[in-house]
Image: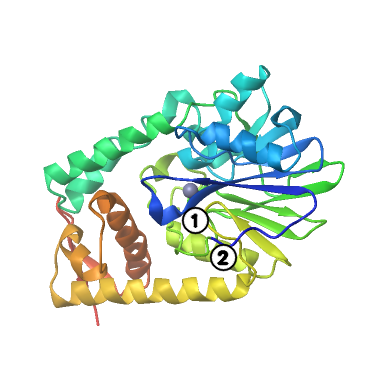
Amino acid sequence: MEPFPEVDNVCAIAIDLPGYADLITANAYAVGSRAFTLIDTAPKFPGAFETLKARLEQCGRDLGEVERILFTHGHVDHFGLAATIRKELGRPVPCFIHAEDARHVTAETYRETMFNESGERLMAMVDMPPEEVEKISERFSLFTSLCDPVLDVETMEEGDVFAGEDYELRVIHTPGHTPGTCCLYETRRKILYSGDHIIKHITPNPLFELRKEILRNPDYQSLKEYIRSLEKIREVDARYVFPGHGEFIEDLPGLISSYRGHHRERMERIWKALKRQSRPLYHIIDEVFDFVPEYDGFLAISEIMVHLELLLEEGRVELVDPGPPAYYRAIG
Ligand SMILES: [Zn+2]
């Protein structure tokens, strides 16, 4: 992996993720020369906390100088170590997340929202075999071991500014990957911290939302929001983009264009599969993806669902039998 460029008040912390090679690393960033803001924390992997501390030391910083932690979104690989950090420091370092993702990091809900009845309903709707559902459920419960909840997380919104002596981070709400995903733009050095909204080596997945009824917009469609959020940041004057995983990015508009091409291609494959034969969605996975790692059954269905929502809206696919399992047909 190409090393991050030197930026005088930034310490880029890239932590290896054994077993999750597709993500390469989980990245956290300390922004500020002395007292600093930490953007994301990496998951509670064995050794991750020690790596985080060692890397900060390498940068000439001390974990004790952290003023606050901002979470780009509510996934375990971004907030998992926050409670460990607070415990080590013996003080409740303020943590912030967009309100739409707050429930993912608090103890009451972060378990139940991961894979609950709405998840099981979706799996029945797509005709996922029970043994596959079991595997997905097991994988989801594994996530809880990679984090500790942050019960008193505070919320942030579009336009909020977190400033220090030599930096200013502006919150840009970019829903799509999750409803509360935010990028942080450091205005003085023109660095965009993109979380999982922008990643260089993979096309980020706008995750299908299982519980739309509790969102601000109950008609929320992940891919539609994601595309809107891509356009929102296309014009950001970013010298570098520092993402939540893998390498830094220089050509933001170019990468965004390649994402749009990827989504169009995925949509055509789904349309063609449903044109060939009207079927429940589990049965088109092999035609839509070239290779699905065994554990990614949920991600495959999620990706099909978010594209299907757009196809339905455009009138290119219709529901022929609500099921379960539901049958869809391509039109045209
Ligand atoms: Zn992530």
Q: Is mark 2 within 8 Å of ligand 1?
A: no
Image quarter (top left, top right, bottom left or bottom right) of the C terminus = bottom left
Quadrant assignment, res 18: top left
Image location of residue 143, percent across then percent down: 38, 35
Q: Secondary structure at mark 1?
A: loop
Instruction: Pick whichever, 25 or 108, lies toward us.
Output: 25
Image x and y of residue 10, in percent = 74, 49
Viewer-side residue, 307 vs 166? 166
> Which is nearer the eye, 95 or 80?
80
In the image, residue 281 lies at what x, y percent? 20, 60
Q: Is residue 273 left or right of residue 158?
A: left
Identify which amino acid the numbered label 1 is placed on.
Answer: Gly
First in sequence: mark 2 vs mark 1: 1
State the image coordinates of residue 309 (x, y, percent, origin top left). Answer: 35, 62
Residue 176's disc is 1
Amino acid bearing label 2:
Leu
Residue shown at 64%/61% (left/top)? 241
Q: Residue furthest right?
A: 165
At horizontal 58% and vertical 62% (from top left) the residue drawn is 2
Q: Is residue 223 above or below residue 220?
A: below
Instruction: Give the total of numbered labels.
Output: 2
Q: Is residue 328 visible?
A: no
User: What residue occupies the far top of the structure in this picture?
Assistant: 90
Q: What residue does disc 2 label?
A: 230
Q: Give the residue at x 32% y 67%.
A: 312
Q: On the image, which quarter does residue 110 sit in? A: top left
Does the residue at mark 2 contact the one at mark 1 (Cβ under 8 Å)? yes
Residue 138 drawn above or below residue 266: above
Q: Is residue 53 visible?
A: yes
